[in-house]
Image: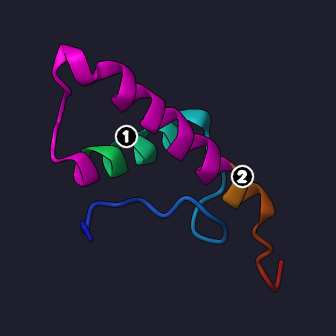
């Protein structure tokens, strides 16, 4: 995976905002789809995928338990 990916879970970051989660989701969808920006006829599917990945990411972060905290 990319070296520039930011870790979004504790203990590596103090606070994760909605923007961080959305940026991670966008990066994932771009990587999987192979498109930096979708063509107009694919924009709806692209945005729906970003929304779904962001929601799944937030759910994961909310449910993770980090030992030692």
Judged left or right of residue 5, residue 17 is right
The colour scheme used to paint the residues is rainbow
Which label number is shown at residue 52? none
Image: 47 above or below 9: above
Residue lying at 37% horizontally and 20% vertically, measured from the top left: 44
Q: Is residue 62 magenta?
A: no
List the residue tagged with mark 1. 26
In terms of secondary structure, where does tag 2 sit?
helix
Mark pair 1, 2: CA separation: 16 Å
- Rendering coords of residue 45 (x, y %): 37, 28
Look at the image and give the residue range highlighted in magenta.
31-58
Residue lying at 34% horizontally and 31% vertically, measured from the top left: 46
Residue lying at 27% horizontally and 71% vertically, measured from the top left: 1
- Rendering coords of residue 28 (x, y %): 35, 51
In which quadrant of the rendered view does residue 40 lie?
A: top left
- Mark 2 is surrounded, within 10 Å at the Cα level, by few (under 14), some (14 to 19) or many (20 or more) other residues, namely few
- Rendering coords of residue 14 (x, y %): 65, 56
Which label number is shown at residue 59? 2
Image: 8 above or below 64: above
- What secondary structure predominates along the stretch shown in magenta? helix
């Amino acid at each position: 995976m990319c070296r520039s990916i930011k870790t979004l879970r504790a203990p590596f970051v103090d606070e994760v905002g909605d923007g961080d989660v959305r940026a991670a989701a966008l990066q994932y969808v771009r990587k999987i789809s192979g498109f930096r920006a979708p063509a107009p006829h694919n924009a709806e599917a692209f945005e729906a995928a970003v929304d779904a990945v962001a929601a799944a990411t937030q759910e994961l972060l909310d449910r993770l338990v980090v030992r030692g905290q």
